[in-house]
Image (cartoon, rainbow, N blue to C red):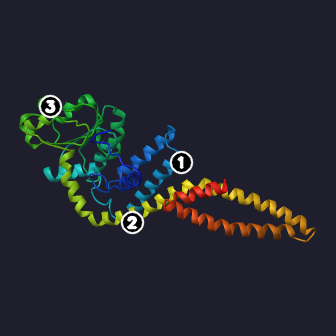
Amino acid sequence: MNHPNIIIEEDKKALKHLLRLASGLESMIIGEDQILGQIKDARLEALKRGLCGPTLDMIFNKAVHVGQIIRNKTKINKGSVSIGSAAVELAESVQGDLKCKKVLVIGAGEMGALVARALAEKQLKAIVVANRTYDRAVRLARELGGYAIQFDRLDEALSDADVVISATAAPHYILTRERVEKAIPIERRDSVTMIDIANPRDIEEKVRELGIRLFNIDDLRGIAEKNRRKRENEARKAEQIIEKELELLVNSLKYKKVEPLISQIRKSMEEIRIRETEKAMQMLGELEDKEKIIDDLTRSIVNKIFHDIISKLRKAAEEDDEELIKACEKLFN
C-alpha cells in the first residue's frame, strides 16, 4: 500500500512509532495532546468491533501510559501545542491583538472546538460559531461565551468577520472564491484573514486572488518549527523515556510468547508435587502436622526449581533463543 497519509512499520519499529505517536513526537505541533485522545478512542472502537485482541490491547495501553508519563515528566505539551492554538497564534501574528476583532469559527467538531477554546483563552468577546448541526454550534458557543448561527447564515457572518478559521470535516470546499466574493465587500477584503485547518481543505485557494490573506495547515509549519525548537530539550528527554519503555514493552511481548509454556511447566510440576506429597504422607503414617509440613516443604522445593526455570526461559525470550524455548516445549510437553 502506497499512500501519503499512511505509514507502515513492522516489528520493533512499529512499536516505537506508536510510542512516539502517543507522546506527540510525530505530530506537526510537537507534544500536542489531541493525538493521545485519538489513540484512546481508536483502541475503544477496535475493542467494540472485536478487532483488538489481548496483545494489541496491551500494546495500545502501553502507548497511552507512555504518552501520559512523558507529559507528566517533561514540558513537551506546554504552550501552543494544538493545531487550534497554533491557528490562533498565526491569526494574532497577522492581525495583532484579537480582542477588538470579530472571529468566525466554521465547524464545531473536534478541531473547531480546539480553535474556539484557544480563542476563549484570549478572553475574546466576538466569537461566532457556525456548524451544519446547529445544536453543536450552540453548545460550543455557550461554553465559550460567544454565539452560534445557522449554517445558512454563513455568508452574513462572513461579511463583517475579521478572522475566519475553518475546520469542518466536509469533503468539498465550504468557501469558494465565488461565495467569498459575494459575501465580503471589496473594501474589507484586504483586512480579512482566513485560516483553513481542515483536511481536505475547506477554502478554495483562489480566494487569495480577492486580496484576502489566506493561510492553510501548511502555513502552520512555521509555528510548528518554532515550537519544535523550543521543545528540543524536552523532546530529547521524551526520546530517552521512550527507549526505556520500548525495551520494557518488547520484553513483555517476548515473555508473553513463553507464558503458555511456563503455565504448562508449572502445572506439570504441581501435579508431580501433589503425587509425591500423597506418597510421603502415606509412608509417614499418623505424625502430627505431617500434611502441612510436607506440603510446605514440597511447595518450597518446586518454587525454587521453578524460579530458576522461569528466569532462564524469560532470558531466552529476551535473547530470541528459539532453540532453548523449543527444547523446553518438547521436554515439558
Estimate how packed mark 1 is, as few (under 14), some (14 to 19) or many (20 or more) residues with alpha carbons within 10 Å. few
Q: Is residue 284 above or below residue 267?
A: below
Residue 332 point in image, percent of width and height: 66, 56
Q: Is residue 304 left or right of residue 184?
A: right
**First in sequence: mark 2 or mark 3?**
2
Q: How many numbered marks does the figure carry?
A: 3
Q: Amino acid at mark 3?
A: Ala
Q: Is residue 206 left or right of residue 80?
A: left
Q: Residue at x 23, y 54 (%)?
A: 224
Camera-nearest residue between 91 and 283: 283
Q: Secondary structure at mark 3?
A: helix
Camera-nearest residue between 157 and 281: 281
Q: Amino acid at mark 2?
A: Lys
Residue position for label 3: 183
**What numbered label is drawn on residue 54?**
1
**What numbered label is drawn on residue 73?**
2
Q: Is residue 189 above or below residue 246?
A: above
Mark 3–mark 1 distance (CA, rounded to whole Å): 54 Å
